[in-house]
Image: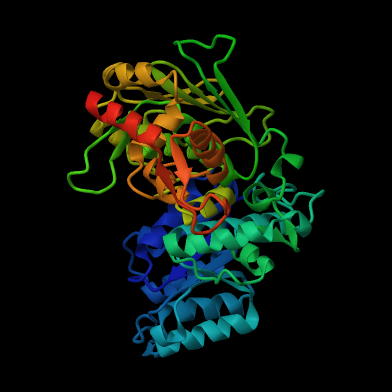
Amino acid sequence: MRKLKVFISSVQSEFATERQMLFDYLMQDALLGLFFEPFIFEKVPASNQRTDNLYLDEVAKCDIYIGIFGKDYGNEEAIINGFASGISPTEQEFDQATKLNKNRLIFITSHNSADRHSKEVALIKKAEKEIVRKMFSTPVELKTAVYTSLIHYLEEKEYIRTGPFDASVNSTAELSDIDGDKVSLFVKIAKSKRGFPLPAVSPTENILTHLNLLNNNKPSNACLLLFGKNPQKFFINSEVKCAHFHGYEIVKPIPSYQVYKGDVFKLVDQAVDFVLSHIDVSTGTREKNVQVDIEYEIPRAVVAEAIVNAIVHRDYTSTGSVQVMLFKDRLEVWNPGQLPSNLTLEKLRTPHGSFPFNPLLAEPMYLAGYIERMGTGTRDIIRLCNEKKLKEPDFLQEDVFKTILWRTGQATAEVTAEVTAEVTAEVSEQIRRVIIVMNGEMKRSEIQEILGLKHAENFRLQYIIPSLEANVIEMTIPEKPKSKNQKYRLTEKGIKIKKMVNLKQ
């Protein structure tokens, strides 16, 4: 079967990076690369043929026309039939695609009309009258929208009969299986983190449609994993198993073992908090800040990146689960999946493109700030470990993909060992951490933020309640335990233990 030609059109100076990104993506993606052959003007060799005629000829040859419309209109001196037309090459190409009844996919930036060239506004209105178009705010959103549109095209033309897992509609699910409160909370976070364009009060269907998570008003698998009321009802293995071993190998009985369930955001928060609760932590002074500085032996960002990668890029059709295992000398994160065919273990350590296994799952994680930049995760892990002077992490592809992060060994353990030995009889490690960060009266959220923990319910159960029961902290409003103004402070017992800790450090 011949590949389908895709003509990518835009104002040359405005979207050069985006055109190249889409070209590389369509050439390298394991699925889309089987079906599509992209064209961008940068790849045209030197020729005596007039450039305006060449591009229009390429439009005539293409199967799919992709138009990217933004603020600029382009060169109004473009030539048609030997005369200056006042029509930009981009509009000429769109008109040619329309005239020849090409499949047209139009992607428009989320700028206001006042920020656009007047002729660009008119071009967008012309496109809106004839075809459905999609909005985007970032290159990541553009790539995801193109991916979704091309998959739908392949399905409609029956080139493929089933879509990728994350884009596929779950036949047993309904929109009622989606938690609207989760969607609204996501929008608030995404707006503050990445400038998400829709307001939190938008109808749930509108938000999910914008994220390409609905198909004929039915939730996709990605939609259920992100915002489902009970994702494990549909994907029983979409859980994270966390275990802490005191030695160097997997040995039973396991001192600490948890199986976490919920949506992917909750899974990440719970798994990261599990690791942080069991690795060594050192504290600084208050010379520059009234609050004490907290530094984990493996940086929180490294732990989070490894766990996010495993959850976002795993194979959800596998019967396996993500496993997070903490040993005396290392942290191992197991992902039941395989590297994309165009990535190698060596390439993970060098600049490389982003090829998410589940792109519709990855984009909301990026928008919510769980992924900083696409395609840099493994290099960020390496860089942060180097800055911390940790042994460089290992990446292994076996029956599962493994990320291995090395601990500092005995360095921080020696700092806290003597103190821990003296107070262990009275308080746990989690309680001790609450004590050392307390400064005056503090809200639960403030204590949690300093410790770098995200899951509020876990923090309440594992840190706050045990600290209250151990009588090392107390409520400032004990008669109203659930008051929004509730704060906590150290008791006399807590102050005594804190002085002991400070003397030993």
Q: Position of residue 245 (x, y in %)?
A: 50, 16
Q: Nearer the viewer, residue 190 or 472?
A: 472
Q: Position of residue 270 (x, y in %)?
A: 54, 38
Note whether 149 is above or below 129 in the view shown. Answer: above
Q: Nearer the viewer, residue 482 or 50?
A: 482
Residue ranking furthest to the right: 172
**Which part of the image, by quadrant, shows the C terminus?**
top left
Question: Is residue 382 visible in this depiction of the protein?
Answer: no
Question: Is residue 129 visible in this depiction of the protein?
Answer: yes
Which residue shows up at 43% across the image and 23% down it? 331
Residue ranking furthest to the left: 287
160 to the left or right of 17: right
319 to the left or right of 296: right
75 to the left or right of 62: left
Q: Position of residue 162 (x, y in %)?
A: 73, 47
Which residue shows up at 70% across the image and 52% down it? 220
Q: Nearer the viewer, residue 4 or 231?
A: 231
Q: Position of residue 433 (x, y in %)?
A: 39, 33
Q: Quadrant of residue 472?
A: top left
Q: Quadrant of residue 5?
A: bottom right
Q: Quadrant of residue 492?
A: top left
